[in-house]
Amino acid sequence: MLLARAVDGGFSDLIEKGDRKRAWRVASTIFWLVLLVLGGLTALFILAAPLLLRPFGDPGGDADLAVGLSRVLFPIVVLLGLSGVIVGILNTYDHFTVPALTPVFWNLAIIAGLALGVPRASGEDAQLYVYAGSVLVGTVIQLLLPVPWLRGLDGRLHCLDRREAVLEVRLHGGRLLRLLRHVWTYFLKRMSIMTTKCGRFSRRRPTA
């Protein structure tokens, strides 16, 4: 992910210079900025879901279903952003195996949901919600799986330093906006796939 590569670049530069305290302050600042900014946007998107989905049209003639599914999926935005920060830190310390395996577990979570949850769901709407929930659970796993490997490093993420946050925004505000836009674009692709599936399920419904 672009966010992981960007964090890796700035973080690793400071590590190579021997300024580990500064490196971890920067990493912590980026982590909290991503959490606060994307978390706030996620809450806004959940509230404004009907307006945001208008460009997608009316998938399968069921706008309420599309809105409900989007509200399940919107938290993926902030989860992907935080995952990118953690992966970037681990990459700096040459921990590539676990970050590389996270997409595998993401897919396994979705497969498990489709294989175990969907057959037990009553109705096509419920099946779509199981699918959306599986994507969300898979993204949570993708975020949490690498976290234990942070404990063995020579620093740790800490609380937000407001002065560091202001400095980081001034120095790299444009880059941070581009990274956030990348996360949003990735989410829109996921949402487009979900609305397409919603339309396919809805068109197969028998008419009264």
Image (spheres, rainbow, N blue to C red):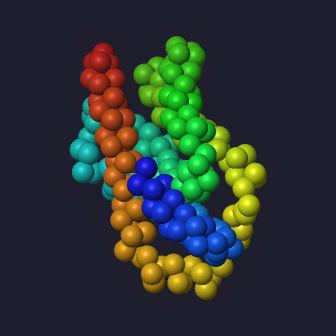
| Residue 52 vs residue 16, the one in the foreground | 16
Residue 67 in the image, given as x and y percentages of width and height: 40, 44
**Residue 18's image quarter?**
bottom right
Instruction: Inspect this view and state whether residue 124 appears.
Output: yes
Q: With 15 as the anchor, is 56 left or right in this view?
A: left
Question: Residue at the location (75% across, 52% down)?
Answer: 151
Q: Note whether 108 is above or below 151 in the view shown.
A: above
**Residue 159's image quarter?**
bottom right
Question: Residue at the location (36% across, 42% down)?
Answer: 191
Instruction: Inspect this view and state whether residue 126 appears.
Output: no
Question: Residue at the location (29% across, 18% down)?
Answer: 204
| Residue 166 vs residue 122, the one in the foreground | 166
Q: Note whether 32 is above or below 119 in the view shown.
A: below
| Residue 127 vs residue 75, the one in the foreground | 75
Residue 179 in the image, given as x and y percentages of width and height: 40, 62
Q: With 119 as the anchor, is 208 left or right in this view?
A: left
**Residue 192's image quarter?**
top left
